Amino acid sequence: MIDHYSDSKSLTNAPPPSDNTDDSILWEEVTDAVRRLKRNKSPGNDGITAEMIKAGGEKLLEKIHSLCNQAWVECHVPEKWLKSVLVSIPKIGGALQCKN
């Protein structure tokens, strides 16, 4: 799943940081962020849901942690991470009413 995001040359072979210094993302930060993901929400452009990430277990968390640290250290994130889709959903009453 994570390999979908990574550039095969730069991110897949990156070792995880050897220690948790001030310039690395802590394991606890990743696990806490995953724990706080809300269920039953729409997936992103990649089709990956919170449920899929939570079901991925420790192996997936290790990949996410490594990938995030790689992006942090290199000050570069995969281009796909920068894309999002925003869909406005009007409330009852019609899309043309400004108060919605």
Image: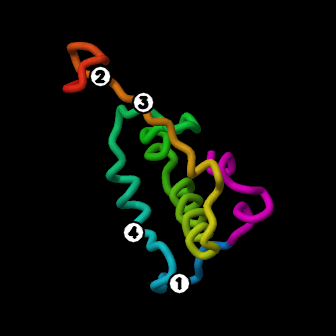
| Span colored in magenta | 1-14
Q: Residues within 10 Å of mark 4 (few under 14, many from 20)?
A: few
- Predominant SS along the magenta part: loop
Q: What color scheme is it?
A: rainbow
Where is the N terminus found, in terms of image quarters?
Answer: top right
Closer to viewer: mark 2 or mark 4: 2
Q: Is residue 11 left or right of residue 82?
A: right
Closer to viewer: mark 2 or mark 1: 2
Expressed as whole percent of the image width and height from the top left, the position of residue 2 reads 62, 50
Q: Residues within 10 Å of mark 1 (few under 14, many from 20)?
A: few
SS state under label 1: loop
Dot label at residue 90: 2
Q: Amino acid at mark 4?
A: Glu
Residue corresponding to mark 4? 28
Dot label at residue 75: none
Counting residues from the N terminus, which is met first, the one under dot 4 or under dot 3? 4
